[in-house]
Image (cartoon, helix red, strand yellow):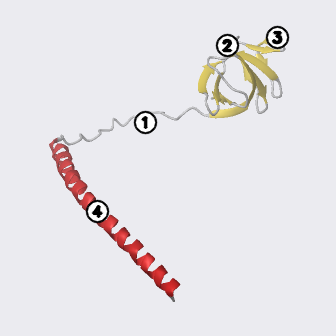
Amino acid sequence: MPLVDKLLTATIRYLQKKQISLRKKSKRKKAAGKKKKKRSQKKTRLRLSRAPKRPVISTGKKTNTKPPQEKALGVVTHYFSRIEVVVIKLSKAGLKVGDTIRIKGSATDFTQKVKSLQIESVDVTSARKGALVGLKAAHKAREGDAVYLVC
């Protein structure tokens, strides 16, 4: 029985300390709450003084604001930083000079127009699916970045 009594007294002391600390915190919260009320009253005054928004008048014309569609092309297999050239493995579709591509990865995301293509150091105007293609990159790319054709 003395062990049980010691445990009970220890838990009672622990609970009493907790209640004292909770009381102190609640006083702090009440004091902080008063300050917040004053700030919120100022904000509401500012909101009331704003002019009402004007209604949007439609002109009846529908604008074609669809985002450009992207078609998967392949993956970046290598990036040569000194000459800023990207090697792309075309696994989904072909590529031509003049097409717009988007290179997207964890740290990269840019769009550029294809100005020149090379397959094994030979200039070409188009490349088919399955080819390894080299092209000049506008920004730094990383291995594994996805390449999309912007339609």
Image quarter hosting the C terminus = top right
Q: Dot 2 lies on which element?
A: loop
Q: Quadrant of residue 62?
A: top left
The residue at the far front in this view is: 2
Looking at the rendered image, the disc whose residue lies closer to the viewer, 1 or 2, is 2
Separation (CA) of disc 2 from disc 4: 70 Å
Q: CA distance from mark 1 to mark 3?
A: 48 Å
Indicate the quadrant where residue 142 lies.
top right
Q: Nearer the viewer, mark 3 or mark 2?
A: 3
Q: Nearer the viewer, mark 1 or mark 3?
A: 3
Circle count: 4
Give the mark, 4 or 1, whose residue is nearer the N terminus: 4
Q: CA distance from mark 4 to mark 1?
A: 62 Å
Q: Name which of mark 4 and mark 3 comes first in the sequence.
A: 4
What residue would you read off at disc 4? 24
Q: Is residue 61 left or right of residue 44?
A: right
Marks 3 and 2: CB-CB under 8 Å?
no
Q: Is residue 115 left or right of residue 54?
A: right
Front in this rendered view, residue 41 or 17: 17
Q: Residue 14 at what x, y percent from top left?
A: 41, 72
Per the image, label 3 sits on a secondary structure element best described as loop
Label 3 to label 2: alpha-carbon separation: 15 Å
Whole-number angstrom distance, CA of label 4 to CA of label 3: 76 Å
Q: Write down the residue under mark 2.
A: 115
Disc assigned to residue 62: 1
Between label 2 and label 4, give the one nearer the viewer: 4
Q: Is residue 1 above or below residue 95?
A: below
Q: Say if mark 4 contacts mark 1, CB within 8 Å.
A: no
